[in-house]
Amino acid sequence: MEPGNETQISEFLLLGLSKKIELQTLIFGLFLSMYLITVIGNLLLILAVSADPHLHTPMYFFLSNLSFVDVCFTSTTIPKMLKNIRTKNKAITYEGCITQIHFFLLFATMEIFLLTVMAYDRFVAICHPLRYTIIMNPWVCGLLALMSWMMSALNSLLQSLMVLWLSFCTDLEIPHFFCEITQVVQLACSDTFLNDIVLYFATMLLGVFPLFWIFFSYSLIFSSILRISSARGKYKAFYTCGSHLFVISLFYSTSLGVYLSSAVTSSSRTILVASVMYTVVTPMLNPFIYSLRIRDMKGTLGRLLSRVPSFNDGIVVGLS
C-alpha cells in the first residue's frame, strides 16, 4: 500500500468467530463453560499434586507446570473475547493487542517446551529406570523449567517488539477472536520481510525441532518397551505414556494445522476452527486426560473431592 495510507492507530477490531448476531449468545455460553472447566480442572490438578507427597515426582512437577500454563494460555484470549461479545464491542486497543500477542506466544511456546521436557522425562524413566532419580533430580527439573521459561520469554519478547516496529493502515480488522500474530502482521503497510523470516525461523526452531525430539524420544521408548519380557510391564509402560502421547497429538495436530491451513487456503473459517482446538479445547481436555489415565492422579483427586463437604452437610451443620 502507499505510505500515504498509513495512520497512527489506537485500536484493532476482532471480528470473532461469527458475524451472525443470533449465534453470539450461544458462542458466549459455550466458551464461558469451556473456560470455567479449563480453569477449575487445571487448578484441581495443581492442588492434587501439591497436596499428595506421593505425587512430588518429576513427572507430576512438569504436569502441574503444564496445568498452570494452560490456565494462563486460555486466560490470555478467552476473557477478552467474552467481554467483546457481552459489550457488543469488537475493539481491542493497540497496546492490548501487542500485550495479548506477547503473552499468547509466551504460554504457547512454554507449552511446547513442557511437552518436550515431559517426553524426555518419560524417556529417562523407561529407558534408564535405575538412574532415573539421579538424572531427573530436583535441581535438573528446576533448571529445565527455568530454561523453558527463559527461552519462551525471549521468543515472545522478540516477536512482540518486532510487531511494534510495523506501521499499519486504515484496514484494521482481524478475522480472528484474538490478536494472532500472523493476522496482525498481514495488516501492516510497512515491509514485513524481517517479521516473516523471524516467524518462520521461530516456527522451525520452537515447533519442528521439539516435535522431532519427541518422536525420537518415543521411538527409543517403544524400542525399550518391546524388550520388556513381561506383558504386565509392557502394559504399565504403555499406560504411563498414553496420556502424554494423546495430549501431544492433539496439541501439535491442531497448532500445526493453523499454519498449514493459512499457507494453503485463504479461508478464515478453517483457521478459526483449528485455533479454537489448540487454544481452548486442548487446555480444557488436558486435566481430564491425565487424571483419568494416570491411576495415582485419579486416586488423589478422588480423595481430595471426597473431603469437600456436600451442600446437604452444610445445611445440617447450620441447623444444628
Image (cartoon, helix red, strand yellow):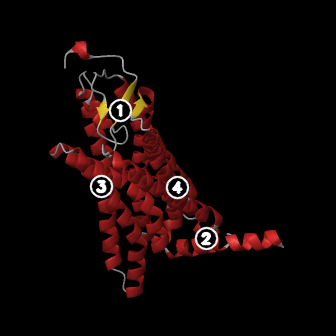
Q: Which numbered disc, 2 or 4, marks the residue closer to the eye? A: 4
Q: Which mark is residue 13?
A: 1
Q: Residue at 54% across / 71% down in the picture?
A: 297
For mark 4, does the 10 Å Cα neighbourhood hold few (<14), some (14 to 19), or many (20 or more) residues? many
Labels 2 and 4 touching (C-beta < 8 A): no
Task: Measure the C-alpha gap from mark 2 to mark 4.
Answer: 24 Å
Q: Amino acid at mark 1?
A: Leu
- Tell me if I can see residue 115 in this picture: no
Instruction: Describe the element under mark 3 as helix, strand or loop.
Output: helix
Marks 4 and 3, Cα distance to the nearest angstrom?
21 Å
Q: Nearer the viewer, mark 2 or mark 3?
A: 3
Residue 234 % position (x, y): 38, 81
Residue projecting furthest to the front: 22
Residue at position x 40%, y 65% from top? 244
Identity of the residue furthest to the left in this view: 264
Quadrant of the frame with the C terminus = bottom right
Tell me the residue that label 2 is attached to.
Answer: 54
Q: Which mark is residue 254?
A: 3
Q: Amino acid at mark 2?
A: His
Q: Which of label 4 and label 1 is nearer to you?
A: 1
Work out whether mark 4 precedes mark 3 in sequence or the reverse, and give the earlier one.
Answer: 4
